[in-house]
Amino acid sequence: MASVLITGANRGLGLEFARQYLAKGWRIFAACREPAAAKALQALAAQSDGKLTVHALEVTDDQAIAALAGDLAKEPIDVLINNAGVNRAEANELGLGNAQAWLDVFAANVVAPVHVATAFLPHVAKGDRRVIATISSRLGSIAENQGGSYAYRASKAAVNAAMRSLSQDARAKGTTVVVLHPGWVRTDMGGAAAPLTPSESIAQLVALIDRIGPRDNGSFLSFDGKPIPW
Ligand SMILES: NC(=O)c1ccc[n+]([C@@H]2O[C@H](COP(=O)([O-])OP(=O)(O)OC[C@H]3O[C@@H](n4cnc5c(N)ncnc54)[C@H](OP(=O)(O)O)[C@@H]3O)[C@@H](O)[C@H]2O)c1
């Protein structure tokens, strides 16, 4: 049975990834900060016949990452989805006094996915698919940058660069590392004006991840499979 580890699986795109992989019959390790408060995810777990388990993971806490990696040490993980992320309005404007907000965005959007990927490389190496997908954003494209969203754009450009490094370093282990843009999606982060529903975005991302193989290593792809300029 194919397996997937999803971070930030309690709401938004992460919850929809969990739903759609469950519908495909996959084994899902669904990670979130507060399992007891993750009602929708727990409801999915309850109807999953043991296929979906919920695991505590604050992605900015290295000890928590190491603990979960230890708990799952015997589990091959076919696909790791680094989905958890934040956007902070106060760090998206020019101005002083918002350094902590910048650092919070970088902790969650850059350092955390790199550390999660690092801790789970051995699990992914044991899987059949061997894919590490980080949910980035088109806003991280330097080529397409039209200004604004300072910390968010910078964090996604930074995680793109880090994952590009990892794609080169993990190639020898047969692991494929990609960064993916989900589209502009109606979640708490995307807001009500976004054109895509989570179901539409994730259906395309799941189909894309199914097609991803070693030839895609190190690429930055949109949900429709088209490459995005760095
Ligand atoms: N929605 C869009 O239009 C859009 C577009 C481009 C890229 N993205 C990216 O897609 C990903 C998911 O976004 P979304 O729209 O689903 O956002 P969302 O609705 O705001 O959900 C964010 C998820 O990340 C989790 N999270 C945040 N910080 C965390 C931490 N330190 N530890 C563990 N979990 C953490 C949240 O958990 P809590 O509930 O505990 O806060 C929540 O599950 C993000 O990486 C985002 O940047 C979204």
Image: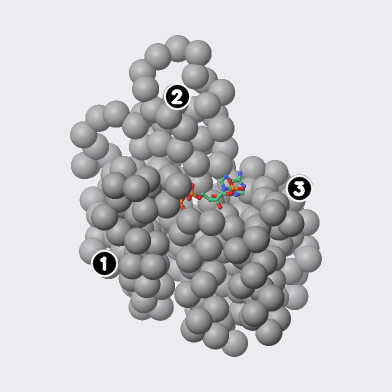
Judging depth in this view, the residue of 3 and 199 nearest the camera is 199
Give amino acid for label 2.
Glu
172 versus 34 height, above or below: below
Question: Toward which corner of the image does residue 77 lie, by quadrant?
Answer: bottom right
As drawn, the label of residue 128 is none
Q: Secondary structure at mark 3?
A: helix
**Pointer 1: residues within 10 angstroms few (<14), some, or many (20+)?**
some
**Which residue is disc 1 drawn over?**
224
Residue 63, numbered label: 3
Q: Residue at x 78, y 56 (%)?
A: 67
Q: What amino acid does circle 1 point to?
A: Asp
Percent from the top left, x then y, of residue 138?
30, 48
**Label 3 CB-ligand 1 distance < 8 A:** no
- Tell me the residue at 27%/67% (across/down): 225
- Give the residue at x 51% y 35%: 105
Vertical comparison of 197 with 74: above or below: above
